[in-house]
Image (spheres, helix red, strand yellow):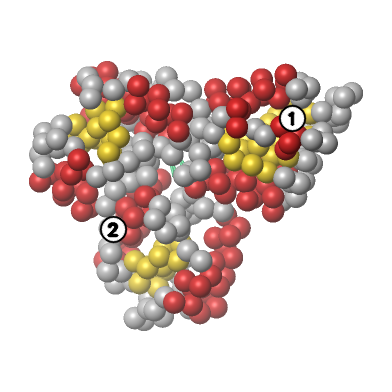
Protein backbone atom coordinates (compact mmCIF):
# COMPACT_ATOMS: atom_id res chain seq x y z
CA UNK A 1 0.00 0.00 0.00
CA UNK A 2 2.73 2.51 0.82
CA UNK A 3 4.50 4.27 -2.02
CA UNK A 4 8.29 4.37 -2.58
CA UNK A 5 10.45 7.53 -2.73
CA UNK A 6 10.18 10.20 -5.41
CA UNK A 7 12.09 10.08 -8.75
CA UNK A 8 15.37 12.07 -8.99
CA UNK A 9 13.54 15.22 -10.11
CA UNK A 10 11.42 14.85 -6.95
CA UNK A 11 8.25 14.64 -8.99
CA UNK A 12 5.97 11.67 -8.64
CA UNK A 13 2.33 10.75 -9.04
CA UNK A 14 0.49 8.59 -6.53
CA UNK A 15 -2.38 6.92 -8.34
CA UNK A 16 -5.24 5.69 -6.19
CA UNK A 17 -6.59 2.19 -6.68
CA UNK A 18 -9.54 1.65 -6.53
CA UNK A 19 -10.71 4.67 -8.49
CA UNK A 20 -13.14 5.33 -11.33
CA UNK A 21 -16.00 3.20 -12.63
CA UNK A 22 -17.96 1.19 -10.09
CA UNK A 23 -20.16 -1.79 -10.90
CA UNK A 24 -23.37 0.28 -10.79
CA UNK A 25 -22.07 2.91 -13.22
CA UNK A 26 -20.65 0.30 -15.60
CA UNK A 27 -24.02 -1.46 -15.63
CA UNK A 28 -25.94 1.78 -16.22
CA UNK A 29 -23.72 2.90 -19.12
CA UNK A 30 -23.80 -0.55 -20.74
CA UNK A 31 -27.57 -0.60 -20.32
CA UNK A 32 -27.91 2.53 -22.43
CA UNK A 33 -25.41 1.29 -25.02
CA UNK A 34 -27.18 -2.04 -25.36
CA UNK A 35 -30.57 -0.34 -25.50
CA UNK A 36 -29.27 1.75 -28.42
CA UNK A 37 -28.00 -1.38 -30.18
CA UNK A 38 -31.14 -3.39 -29.58
CA UNK A 39 -33.87 -0.79 -30.10
CA UNK A 40 -32.08 1.92 -32.13
CA UNK A 41 -31.93 5.69 -31.55
CA UNK A 42 -33.39 7.66 -30.06
CA UNK A 43 -33.27 6.22 -26.57
CA UNK A 44 -34.51 8.61 -23.92
CA UNK A 45 -32.78 8.72 -20.55
CA UNK A 46 -34.38 10.42 -17.56
CA UNK A 47 -31.69 12.62 -15.94
CA UNK A 48 -28.00 12.04 -16.55
CA UNK A 49 -27.49 8.27 -16.67
CA UNK A 50 -24.47 8.80 -14.38
CA UNK A 51 -23.04 12.10 -13.17
CA UNK A 52 -20.19 12.45 -15.65
CA UNK A 53 -19.97 15.03 -18.42
CA UNK A 54 -17.82 12.89 -20.74
CA UNK A 55 -20.11 9.86 -20.47
CA UNK A 56 -23.24 11.94 -21.03
CA UNK A 57 -21.76 13.83 -24.01
CA UNK A 58 -20.54 10.58 -25.61
CA UNK A 59 -23.93 8.90 -25.27
CA UNK A 60 -25.68 12.01 -26.58
CA UNK A 61 -23.56 11.80 -29.74
CA UNK A 62 -24.71 8.18 -30.17
CA UNK A 63 -28.38 9.10 -30.15
CA UNK A 64 -29.43 9.38 -26.52
CA UNK A 65 -31.81 12.16 -25.60
CA UNK A 66 -31.50 13.17 -21.97
CA UNK A 67 -34.62 14.62 -20.35
CA UNK A 68 -35.36 15.92 -16.88
CA UNK A 69 -38.82 14.41 -16.55
CA UNK A 70 -40.74 11.51 -18.10
CA UNK A 71 -43.37 14.05 -19.25
CA UNK A 72 -40.84 15.16 -21.88
CA UNK A 73 -40.66 11.66 -23.42
CA UNK A 74 -43.05 11.08 -26.37
CA UNK A 75 -45.87 8.60 -25.66
CA UNK A 76 -44.81 5.00 -26.30
CA UNK A 77 -41.06 5.76 -26.53
CA UNK A 78 -38.29 3.94 -24.67
CA UNK A 79 -36.88 5.58 -21.55
CA UNK A 80 -34.05 4.42 -19.31
CA UNK A 81 -34.04 5.40 -15.66
CA UNK A 82 -30.63 6.47 -14.39
CA UNK A 83 -28.32 4.73 -11.91
CA UNK A 84 -29.50 7.06 -9.13
CA UNK A 85 -32.96 5.53 -8.99
CA UNK A 86 -36.48 6.91 -9.24
CA UNK A 87 -39.50 7.08 -6.95
CA UNK A 88 -42.64 4.98 -7.49
CA UNK A 89 -44.37 8.16 -8.72
CA UNK A 90 -42.00 8.28 -11.70
CA UNK A 91 -42.75 4.62 -12.57
CA UNK A 92 -46.47 5.39 -12.37
CA UNK A 93 -46.17 8.43 -14.62
CA UNK A 94 -44.23 6.38 -17.17
CA UNK A 95 -46.91 3.69 -17.12
CA UNK A 96 -49.66 6.29 -17.63
CA UNK A 97 -47.82 7.63 -20.66
CA UNK A 98 -47.33 4.12 -22.08
CA UNK A 99 -43.57 4.48 -22.01
CA UNK A 100 -41.38 1.44 -22.43
CA UNK A 101 -38.94 1.55 -19.52
CA UNK A 102 -35.60 0.02 -18.61
CA UNK A 103 -34.51 0.65 -15.06
CA UNK A 104 -30.74 1.14 -14.69
CA UNK A 105 -30.99 1.96 -10.98
CA UNK A 106 -27.90 0.61 -9.22
CA UNK A 107 -28.84 -2.48 -7.19
CA UNK A 108 -27.19 -0.86 -4.16
CA UNK A 109 -29.58 2.10 -4.45
CA UNK A 110 -32.49 -0.31 -4.86
CA UNK A 111 -31.36 -1.93 -1.61
CA UNK A 112 -31.83 1.39 0.21
CA UNK A 113 -35.28 1.83 -1.42
CA UNK A 114 -36.25 -1.58 -0.04
CA UNK A 115 -35.04 -0.59 3.43
CA UNK A 116 -37.22 2.53 3.28
CA UNK A 117 -40.22 0.40 2.35
CA UNK A 118 -39.56 -2.09 5.08
CA UNK A 119 -39.12 0.49 7.85
CA UNK A 120 -42.10 2.51 6.62
CA UNK A 121 -44.22 -0.66 6.74
CA UNK A 122 -43.07 -1.20 10.32
CA UNK A 123 -44.19 2.38 11.06
CA UNK A 124 -40.73 3.85 11.70
CA UNK A 125 -39.77 7.46 11.17
CA UNK A 126 -36.85 7.37 8.75
CA UNK A 127 -34.06 9.94 8.94
CA UNK A 128 -32.37 9.88 5.55
CA UNK A 129 -28.87 11.39 5.64
CA UNK A 130 -28.13 12.85 2.22
CA UNK A 131 -27.75 15.94 0.10
CA UNK A 132 -30.84 18.01 -0.53
CA UNK A 133 -31.81 18.04 -4.22
CA UNK A 134 -29.68 15.02 -5.20
CA UNK A 135 -31.58 12.71 -7.56
CA UNK A 136 -30.83 9.62 -5.51
CA UNK A 137 -32.27 11.19 -2.37
CA UNK A 138 -35.42 12.29 -4.23
CA UNK A 139 -35.96 8.74 -5.49
CA UNK A 140 -35.28 7.11 -2.13
CA UNK A 141 -37.44 9.55 -0.14
CA UNK A 142 -40.18 9.12 -2.74
CA UNK A 143 -40.67 5.50 -1.62
CA UNK A 144 -42.35 6.74 1.57
CA UNK A 145 -42.62 10.54 1.50
CA UNK A 146 -44.74 10.65 4.69
CA UNK A 147 -42.18 8.73 6.71
CA UNK A 148 -38.84 10.07 5.42
CA UNK A 149 -37.13 13.26 6.62
CA UNK A 150 -33.93 14.43 4.99
CA UNK A 151 -30.96 15.25 7.20
CA UNK A 152 -28.29 17.14 5.30
CA UNK A 153 -26.69 19.75 7.58
CA UNK A 154 -26.14 19.79 11.37
CA UNK A 155 -29.04 22.28 11.51
CA UNK A 156 -31.33 19.62 10.07
CA UNK A 157 -30.50 17.40 13.05
CA UNK A 158 -32.12 19.96 15.34
CA UNK A 159 -35.14 20.38 13.09
CA UNK A 160 -36.34 16.78 12.67
CA UNK A 161 -39.36 15.67 14.69
CA UNK A 162 -40.39 12.06 15.26
CA UNK A 163 -43.62 10.53 16.49
CA UNK A 164 -42.04 7.88 18.71
CA UNK A 165 -38.31 8.17 19.63
CA UNK A 166 -38.14 4.40 20.10
CA UNK A 167 -39.16 3.83 16.46
CA UNK A 168 -36.71 5.81 14.43
CA UNK A 169 -34.00 4.63 12.04
CA UNK A 170 -31.32 6.37 10.00
CA UNK A 171 -30.51 5.44 6.42
CA UNK A 172 -28.26 7.25 3.95
CA UNK A 173 -27.47 8.20 0.39
CA UNK A 174 -24.93 5.77 -1.08
CA UNK A 175 -22.27 8.32 -2.05
CA UNK A 176 -21.59 10.33 1.10
CA UNK A 177 -18.42 10.92 3.05
CA UNK A 178 -18.16 8.01 5.47
CA UNK A 179 -16.71 10.18 8.26
CA UNK A 180 -19.18 13.02 7.86
CA UNK A 181 -22.09 10.59 7.86
CA UNK A 182 -20.94 9.00 11.12
CA UNK A 183 -20.63 12.51 12.58
CA UNK A 184 -24.26 13.20 11.61
CA UNK A 185 -25.33 9.84 13.08
CA UNK A 186 -23.59 10.78 16.34
CA UNK A 187 -25.50 14.07 16.45
CA UNK A 188 -28.77 12.27 15.74
CA UNK A 189 -28.10 9.72 18.45
CA UNK A 190 -27.64 12.52 20.98
CA UNK A 191 -31.20 13.58 20.19
CA UNK A 192 -32.60 10.07 19.73
CA UNK A 193 -30.61 7.55 21.82
CA UNK A 194 -32.72 4.67 20.53
CA UNK A 195 -32.04 5.52 16.87
CA UNK A 196 -31.73 2.24 14.97
CA UNK A 197 -28.90 1.58 12.49
CA UNK A 198 -29.47 0.36 8.91
CA UNK A 199 -29.35 -3.44 8.53
CA UNK A 200 -26.17 -3.01 6.44
CA UNK A 201 -24.05 -0.11 5.18
CA UNK A 202 -25.91 2.23 2.83
CA UNK A 203 -22.75 4.04 1.74
CA UNK A 204 -21.70 1.70 -1.03
CA UNK A 205 -18.47 -0.27 -1.33
CA UNK A 206 -17.27 1.90 -4.24
CA UNK A 207 -17.72 5.18 -2.38
CA UNK A 208 -15.99 3.95 0.77
CA UNK A 209 -13.18 2.17 -1.12
CA UNK A 210 -12.37 5.31 -3.14
CA UNK A 211 -12.34 7.42 0.01
CA UNK A 212 -10.12 4.91 1.81
CA UNK A 213 -7.62 4.87 -1.08
CA UNK A 214 -7.37 8.65 -1.29
CA UNK A 215 -6.95 8.85 2.49
CA UNK A 216 -4.06 6.40 2.34
CA UNK A 217 -2.03 8.70 0.10
CA UNK A 218 -3.34 12.20 0.88
CA UNK A 219 -0.82 13.07 3.61
CA UNK A 220 2.04 12.51 1.14
CA UNK A 221 0.48 14.72 -1.54
CA UNK A 222 1.16 18.40 -2.23
CA UNK A 223 -1.79 18.32 -4.59
CA UNK A 224 -4.60 15.83 -5.21
CA UNK A 225 -6.44 15.93 -8.53
CA UNK A 226 -9.82 14.20 -8.54
CA UNK A 227 -11.25 13.52 -11.99
CA UNK A 228 -15.00 13.89 -11.77
CA UNK A 229 -17.91 16.20 -12.48
CA UNK A 230 -19.24 18.99 -10.31
CA UNK A 231 -22.63 17.24 -9.91
CA UNK A 232 -21.02 13.93 -8.85
CA UNK A 233 -21.48 13.53 -5.11
CA UNK A 234 -18.88 10.81 -4.59
CA UNK A 235 -16.28 12.75 -6.66
CA UNK A 236 -16.77 15.92 -4.63
CA UNK A 237 -16.45 13.93 -1.42
CA UNK A 238 -13.04 12.68 -2.62
CA UNK A 239 -11.76 16.27 -2.75
CA UNK A 240 -13.00 16.91 0.80
CA UNK A 241 -11.61 13.62 2.12
CA UNK A 242 -8.20 14.32 0.53
CA UNK A 243 -7.98 17.71 2.23
CA UNK A 244 -9.17 16.35 5.57
CA UNK A 245 -6.60 13.55 5.35
CA UNK A 246 -3.70 15.97 4.90
CA UNK A 247 -3.34 16.82 1.21
CA UNK A 248 -2.01 20.37 0.92
CA UNK A 249 -4.35 21.18 -1.97
CA UNK A 250 -7.04 19.33 -3.94
CA UNK A 251 -9.20 20.08 -6.98
CA UNK A 252 -12.01 18.47 -8.95
CA UNK A 253 -11.61 18.48 -12.74
CA UNK A 254 -13.58 16.99 -15.61
CA UNK A 255 -10.62 16.98 -17.99
CA UNK A 256 -6.82 17.35 -17.85
CA UNK A 257 -7.22 20.62 -19.75
CA UNK A 258 -8.86 22.12 -16.65
CA UNK A 259 -5.68 21.84 -14.58
CA UNK A 260 -4.46 25.32 -13.66
CA UNK A 261 -0.65 25.44 -14.06
CA UNK A 262 -0.56 27.55 -10.89
CA UNK A 263 -1.71 24.52 -8.87
CA UNK A 264 1.50 22.72 -9.91
CA UNK A 265 3.89 25.41 -8.68
CA UNK A 266 6.35 23.98 -6.08
CA UNK A 267 4.53 20.63 -6.15
CA UNK A 268 6.46 17.35 -5.95
CA UNK A 269 3.86 14.69 -5.22
CA UNK A 270 0.55 14.76 -7.09
CA UNK A 271 -2.19 12.36 -6.01
CA UNK A 272 -4.61 11.27 -8.72
CA UNK A 273 -7.95 9.59 -8.30
CA UNK A 274 -11.40 9.64 -9.91
CA UNK A 275 -15.03 9.33 -8.97
CA UNK A 276 -17.16 6.24 -9.46
CA UNK A 277 -18.72 7.61 -12.66
CA UNK A 278 -15.42 8.40 -14.40
CA UNK A 279 -14.03 6.29 -17.27
CA UNK A 280 -10.30 5.58 -16.86
CA UNK A 281 -9.50 7.15 -20.24
CA UNK A 282 -9.87 10.56 -18.54
CA UNK A 283 -7.39 9.55 -15.83
CA UNK A 284 -4.89 8.39 -18.47
CA UNK A 285 -5.24 11.74 -20.23
CA UNK A 286 -4.40 13.45 -16.94
CA UNK A 287 -1.37 11.17 -16.42
CA UNK A 288 -0.16 12.08 -19.94
CA UNK A 289 -0.61 15.76 -19.14
CA UNK A 290 1.41 15.38 -15.93
CA UNK A 291 4.11 13.27 -17.63
CA UNK A 292 4.62 16.05 -20.21
CA UNK A 293 5.38 18.37 -17.28
CA UNK A 294 7.85 16.07 -15.54
CA UNK A 295 5.62 13.83 -13.44
CA UNK A 296 6.55 10.59 -15.22
CA UNK A 297 7.02 8.46 -12.15
CA UNK A 298 3.60 6.93 -11.38
CA UNK A 299 3.19 4.75 -8.31
CA UNK A 300 -0.09 3.00 -7.69
CA UNK A 301 -1.44 3.04 -4.12
CA UNK A 302 -3.70 0.00 -3.85
CA UNK A 303 -5.97 -0.43 -0.86
CA UNK A 304 -8.57 -2.88 -2.23
CA UNK A 305 -9.28 -5.15 -5.18
CA UNK A 306 -12.82 -4.79 -6.42
CA UNK A 307 -14.44 -7.72 -8.18
CA UNK A 308 -18.11 -6.79 -7.94
CA UNK A 309 -20.24 -6.82 -11.11
CA UNK A 310 -23.99 -6.56 -11.55
CA UNK A 311 -26.21 -8.31 -14.09
CA UNK A 312 -27.84 -6.09 -16.68
CA UNK A 313 -31.54 -5.21 -16.37
CA UNK A 314 -33.81 -8.11 -17.33
CA UNK A 315 -34.69 -6.66 -20.76
CA UNK A 316 -31.02 -6.83 -21.84
CA UNK A 317 -29.79 -9.89 -19.96
CA UNK A 318 -28.56 -11.75 -23.01
CA UNK A 319 -25.99 -9.01 -23.55
CA UNK A 320 -22.45 -9.03 -22.12
CA UNK A 321 -21.55 -6.30 -19.64
CA UNK A 322 -18.67 -4.22 -20.98
CA UNK A 323 -18.85 -0.52 -21.60
CA UNK A 324 -17.49 1.18 -24.72
CA UNK A 325 -17.24 4.49 -22.81
CA UNK A 326 -14.17 3.72 -20.76
S1 LIG B 1 -21.44 4.70 -6.55
FE1 LIG B 1 -22.19 2.90 -5.44
S2 LIG B 1 -24.41 3.15 -5.38
FE2 LIG B 1 -23.64 4.56 -6.93
S3 LIG B 1 -23.75 3.41 -8.84
FE3 LIG B 1 -21.72 3.03 -8.00
S4 LIG B 1 -21.90 1.13 -6.79
FE4 LIG B 1 -23.96 1.94 -7.16
Please say if 192 is above or below 4. below
User: Residue 163 in the image: x percent, y percent?
Assistant: 34, 81
Residue 47: quadrant of the picture:
top left
Give 259 or 97, whichever is nearer the viewer: 259
Residue drawn at 27 percent across, 52 percent down = 87
Q: Tell me the number on the disc at residue 63.
A: none
Q: Residues within 10 Å of mark 2 (few under 14, many from 20)?
A: some
Q: Relative to 236, does residue 119 appear above or below in the rendering? A: below
Residue 279 pos. (x, y %): 51, 28
Q: Quadrant of residue 250?
A: top right
Residue at the spot 28% in from the left edge and 43% down from the top edge: 68
Give the CA distance from mark 2 to mark 1: 43 Å
- How far from the left and from the top, in percent, is residue 256? 61, 28
Please determine whether, in this image, residue 241 is positioned above or below residue 253: below
Q: Earlier in the sequence, mark 2 or mark 1?
A: 1
Secondary structure under tag 2 reads: loop
Q: Residue 309: percent from the left, percent from the top?
A: 44, 32
Residue furthest to the right: 8
Query: In the image, is 266 to the left or to the right of 48?
Result: right
Q: Nearer the viewer, residue 22 or 308?
A: 22
In the visual, does 271 lie left or right of 112? Answer: right
Q: Where ligand 1 lies, by image quadrant?
A: top left
Please identify the quadrant where the N terminus is shown: top right
Residue 50 visible in the current orientation: yes
Identified at 24% across, 32% down, the residue is: 44
Query: Which residue corresponds to mark 1?
Result: 13
| Residue ID for mark 2 | 142
Decide: is 198 above or below 287: below
Amino acid sequence: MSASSPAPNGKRVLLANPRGYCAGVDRAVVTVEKALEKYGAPVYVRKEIVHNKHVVDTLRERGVIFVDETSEVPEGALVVFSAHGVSPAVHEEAAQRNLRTIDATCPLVTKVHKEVNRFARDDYDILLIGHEGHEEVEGTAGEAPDRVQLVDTPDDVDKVTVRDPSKVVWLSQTTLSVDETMERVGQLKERFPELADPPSDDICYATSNRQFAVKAMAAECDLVLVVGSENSSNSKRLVEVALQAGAKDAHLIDYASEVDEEWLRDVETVGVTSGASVPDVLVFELLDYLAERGWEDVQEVTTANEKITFALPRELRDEKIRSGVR
